Amino acid sequence: MRAVAVIGAATAVPASYYRHFADWMARRGYAVLTFDYRGIAASREALRPGEDVRLRDWARVDMAAALHAADRRRREESAAQQRDLGLLWVGHSLGGNSVGLVPGFEDKVDAVLGVAAQVAYLGHWSGFARVQAWAFFHLVLPSLVRLLGHAPGRVLGPRAQDLPAGAALEWAAWGRTPGFLFGDDTLARERAYDRFSGAVHLWHITDDHLFGPAAAVDALAQQFSAARVQRHGIAPADLGVKKIEHFGPFRRDLGAQLWPRLLGPIEAASPRLAAHL
């Protein structure tokens, strides 16, 4: 086994969406953990009737539980192989921008690979996309929660499921706040991005105008001030396709062309992720 990896999903996106990527990583030598946030897909029933959950809860509790399990597996395998194995965190959107809220992540994770992970403050959008972001955070999410008690997945993206009320309202509040979650003073003591010293590779998709523009990804890169950060971009033309967008990077039909591009640089930058097969 090469290393252990955790895949943190985008907002309201089920873990099953990443299964082909996880299978590919397993063939590359990783032990891979995917998981659903409480209230989503296979973890829908984990929320009791009347219970709610916020984005910060997914990071501080759900992501933390996944990281604890992965770290335990890493330590067991390291002892069995008598060498230090690495732990890679792969974060898509929310799964990447919230990793610094996970307790102890700076001590357990060796490298962070962010795909369309961003500081999703509407000020990082431009042109008509900024208008869309303003309407989404000021009007759409709050109104849907008032009317329906949740945000329907069909308005969030082609892969998304219904978003619990607390998560939707916190997403809206952060999106209106300069700095996104980094502008939320209630999280000041919990943010550990600046204490992480491993490799951080952040990718933006050039045609991801709706969820992850380059400026928003750049803003996240700035938060990892003590890390070895590399910024990357990928365009549809690089893969010979018409579009990738926010949900394209983990599609099986793009995998053979795209996934080695995502993993290769961060493996080269992280000795503990090097192959020992």
Image (tube, rainbow, N blue to C red):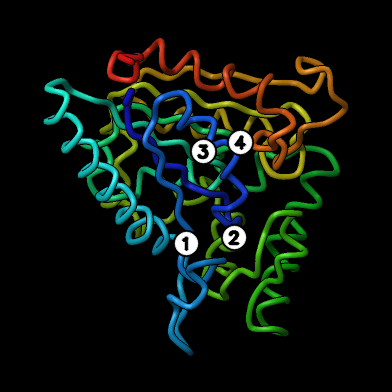
Q: CA distance from mark 4 to mark 1?
A: 19 Å
Q: Which mark is residue 116?
A: 4
Lateral position of residue 68 relative to residue 46, left or right: left
Callout 4: 10 Å neighbours few (<14), some, many (20+)? many
Callout 4 amino acid: Ala
Coordinates of residue 270 in the picture (x, y in percent): 34, 16
Residue 119 x/y as whole percent:
55, 42
Q: Earlier in the sequence, mark 3 or mark 4?
A: 3
Circles 1, 2 touching at the beta carbon (< 8 Å)? yes
Label 2 CA crowd tier, 10 Å (few <14, some 14–19, many 20+): many
What is the CA distance from the residue labelled 1 to the residue labelled 3?
Answer: 17 Å
* Residue 37's disc number: 1
Q: As displayed, is residue 114 above or below residue 41?
A: above
* Three-letter amino acid code at the position of disc 2: Ala
Give me the C-alpha separation between circle 3 and circle 4.
17 Å
Amino acid type of the residue tagged 3 in the rendering: Ala
Callout 1, which amino acid? Tyr
User: Of marks 1 and 2, which one's residue comes earlier in the chain?
Assistant: 2
**Left or right: 99 in relation to 117:** left
Mark 3 vs mark 2: give the one in front: 3
Q: Nearer the viewer, residue 180 or 149?
A: 149
| Badge 3 element | helix
Residue topped by disc 3: 22
Among the two numbered marks 1 and 3 on one chain, the one whose residue lies closer to the N terminus = 3
Residue 154 in the image: state x and y as whole percent: 77, 64
Mark 3 or mark 2: whose residue is earlier in sequence: 2
Q: Which residue is pictured at 74% across the width and 26% down the height?
A: 206
Q: CA distance from mark 2 to mark 4?
A: 15 Å
Residue 93, quarter of the rendered image: top right
